[in-house]
Amino acid sequence: MTTLQLLFDEYWPHLALLLSIAVGSTAAVHAAMTKSDVRAAIAWVGVIIMSPLLGPLAYLIAGINRIRHDHISDQRNRSLRQYTLGTPLAPIDVARLAAPQFVSLRTLSNRISRFALRDGNHVQILRSGDEAYPAMIAAIDGAQRTIALQTYIFDNDSQGKLFVEALARAHRRGVEIRVLIDAIGVRYSRPPNITWALRRNNIPYALFMTNPLGMRMPYANLRSHRKILVVDGRVGFTGGMNIREHFVSNVAGDKVGSDTHFRIEGPVVVQLMAVFAHDWEFTTKETLAFDRWVAHDWDPPTPHVAARCIHSGPDRYVASTHSLLLGAFAVAQHHIRIQSPYFLPDQVLLGAINTAARRGVLVDIVIPGQNNLRLVNYAMTAQLDQVVRAGCRVWRAAGNFNHSKLTTIDGAWSLIGSSNFDPRSLRLNFELDMEIYSRRLARQIEDLIDLEISHSELVTLESLAAIPFRKRLRNRIIWLASPYL
């Protein structure tokens, strides 16, 4: 044996200790210096210290934000401003459209979103796959120039195949198509996944955040949860719906799930297209020509609403939706309605909700009685006492799982889109939401939430205390890991 081998055999425990100290110290310093949330910093430093080698590895995989803050060039930013803002716009009178207290909220959203609040939009509510999927496929079949489709889950099932067939028909007509699917979401489907069908029909597609720099795992915790369909730059669809047959009654039968999606016409569609173009360029390096992909005039049906897109993600827009919700709860005067499948707000957002309730604002929170994510349901249940004790009304809906993500304030302002009230949506995922100033639309969304409340069970402190201790302990243990669910 060589001298080097002898030394290694004798001193390898010391070398391993030195290596673990060096790697652990580097990872702990990085977490302490880069995490803006003190709880996240403490949690990661604890994991790193308590598990000297596995902890730094876990941090390397899931804890480091590798998304560039300069996703696009200055020239690209100028193009986005040209097509989303155009000439300077006169301030929209949100006091007339919604209520006086929303003037300050408009100021806040002006500062957190790069998009302008635009009037002249028509928004139509689509309930679950029975309404949303036929409307989306009809728009695809009517496409003349372009189709941009982005989704988190695109199942290779009966409904996914209908979408592929419609896209294939459009492709044969000469329509230019781009399809962007999240690299994690695409794996929800049983093999073969939908990319096989897209490739067979020569439909251009890409997977968001897949295999960058030859590595997969370091990016597995960052996902695009956005749902966008833009046809000819003129008609858009967004909301909370993925593409899967679970939301179609004649396929899923008694187990059909519920969700809410939206069909949109008007200048805010340009903002939807801008978000898609940004993500497509980030993924593929291809710049889409806005002259072709965006409409320049609109004549949407009445009534009109004022709206803007709020996009968020683990980049420069990490706190956009979170900040907007804080502002919305602060200006609320009468009634807050929240419907979310995953209600796990952080302590700051919890504080804003509870403060509104203590001010006398009626707060209704609707969550599913049956949840598709068991661990999230356990963590949600462990935290409900904090809002119930503050005076909020929490409702567990009966019936099948409802995936809708809806918020209204004072019957005049609404937030729709892909974001859940949980750490993943508000910190890790790339999300897309839309704020809307309209009494009419807010009332329509309130009707949907109130309908859900009408067949829900009120959660009380007594009902929470009646849960067996072993289950409450289990829920609290899962709740401790809620930032990572």
Image (spheres, rainbow, N blue to C red):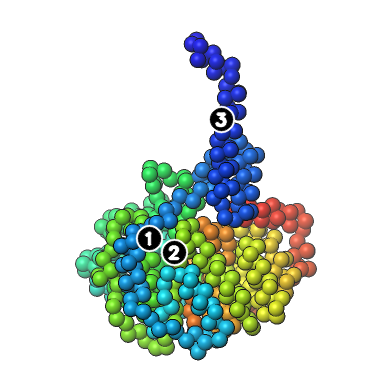
- The Cα atoms of the two marked residues, 2 and 3, are separated by 41 Å
Q: Residue at x 66, y 75 (%)?
A: 356
Residue 13 x, y percent position in the rendering? 60, 23
Identity, as a three-letter code, of the amino acid under mark 3:
Leu
The answer to whether residue 250 is seen in the rendering is no
Task: Give whichever of discs 1 and 3 has the lower sequence position.
Answer: 3
Residue 335 x, y percent position in the rendering? 63, 81
Identity, as a three-letter code, of the amino acid under mark 2:
Arg
Q: Residue at x 67, y 68 (%)?
A: 351
Q: Is residue 305 above or below residue 230?
A: below
Q: Residue under circle 2?
A: 226
In the rendered structure, find residue 279 and report the number of the disc placed on it: 1
In the rendered structure, find residue 452 and report the number of the disc placed on it: none
Identity, as a three-letter code, of the amino acid under mark 1:
Asp
In the rendered structure, find residue 19 and report the number of the disc placed on it: 3
Q: Quadrant of residue 384?
A: bottom right
